Every structure is written in structure tokens, then in C-alpha cells.
Image (cartoon, rainbow, N blue to C red):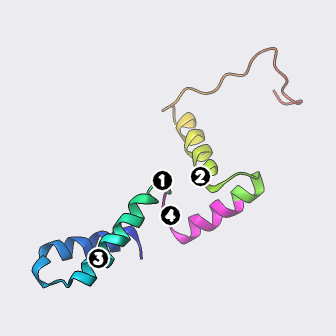
């Protein structure tokens, strides 16, 4: 179930609260609590999730670290963040 589906179900339940059984309401509230508890994760479409999994294993980092890296790179490339300056005396491993 996606976040949008859960939100729609909760909104529908709020609109007809008198018609919902206590057990159904309890299930919905527990699902909502679980989603809130795990809200640190960003949900992506299946093809994006697959690409993230491939990249994170290739780079040897976690999924969340890969997302942080991608967002930072995008923000630097689009001038939303300043680009990291290399130290002039630093080691570049043969790359300028």
C-alpha cells in the first residue's frame, strides 16, 4: 500500500467516522503510526528503487546515503548549493 493510498483511506475514514468499526479504525491508526515511524525513508517508484539499489551496491553505501549523494550533486550542479572546492595542495589521484 502506498502513502497516497493510506492517506486516502484515512481521509475517507475521517469523513465517515461513525460508520467505521473500532477494529478497522485501530488497523488504520496502527498503519499510520508505522508509516510515521518510518517516515525517514523516501518512497520511490519501482524503477527508481531498482536503480537506487544497483547504485548503492556499486558504491558500497546505503540507500539513504545514495539519495543524499544524488540530491547534493544535483543541487550543486544546478547552483542551489556551492560546489565543494578542492584544496589546491590536496591529492587528486591524477585527476584535475
The circle drawn on residue 26 is 3
Q: Secondary structure at mark 4?
A: loop
Name the image quarter holding residue 49. Answer: bottom right
- Structural crowding at the residue carrying mark 3, measured as other residues with C-alpha within 10 Å and reported as few (<14), some (14–19) or many (≥20): few
**Residues at marks 3 and 1, CA–CA distance in whole angstroms:** 23 Å
Q: Residue at x 33, y 78 (%)?
A: 27
Could you give the CA–CA distance between mark 1 and mark 4, rounded to whole angstroms? Answer: 13 Å
Labels 1 & 2 near each other (Cβ < 8 A): yes
From which residue to which does the magenta span run? 42-54
Instruction: Name which quarter of the figure residue 36 lies in.
Output: bottom left
The answer to whether residue 33 is left or right of residue 46 is left
Magenta segment, prevailing SS (helix, strand or loop): helix
Height in image: 82 above or below 45? above
Q: Which residue is mark 2?
A: 64
Q: Quadrant of the C terminus?
A: top right
Q: CA distance from mark 4 to mark 2?
A: 12 Å
Residue at left offset 70%, top offset 56%:
56
The residue carrying mark 1 is: 40
Question: Which residue: 53% across, 38% down?
Answer: 75
Nearer to us in this view, 27 or 48: 27
First reached walking from the N terminus: tag 3 or tag 1: 3
Q: Disc 4 or 2, which lies upstream in sequence?
A: 4
Q: Position of residue 28 (x, y in %)?
A: 31, 75
- In the image, 4: left or right of 60? left
For the N terminus, the quadrant is: bottom left
Q: Nearer the viewer, mark 1 or mark 4?
A: 1
Instruction: Name the residue tied to disc 4.
Output: 44
SS class, disc 2: helix
Residue 48 included in the magenta stretch of the image:
yes
Amino acid at each position: 500500500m502506498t502513502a497516497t493510498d493510506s492517506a486516502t483511506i484515512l481521509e475517507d475514514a475521517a469523513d465517515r467516522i461513525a460508520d467505521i468499526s473500532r477494529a478497522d479504525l485501530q488497523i488504520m491508526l496502527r498503519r499510520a503510526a508505522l508509516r510515521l515511524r518510518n517516515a525517514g525513508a523516501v518512497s520511490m517508484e519501482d524503477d527508481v528503487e531498482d536503480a537506487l539499489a544497483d547504485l548503492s551496491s556499486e558504491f558500497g553505501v546505503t540507500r539513504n546515503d545514495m539519495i543524499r549523494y544524488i540530491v547534493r550533486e544535483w543541487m550543486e550542479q544546478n547552483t542551489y548549493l556551492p560546489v565543494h572546492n578542492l584544496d589546491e595542495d590536496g591529492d587528486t589521484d591524477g585527476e584535475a
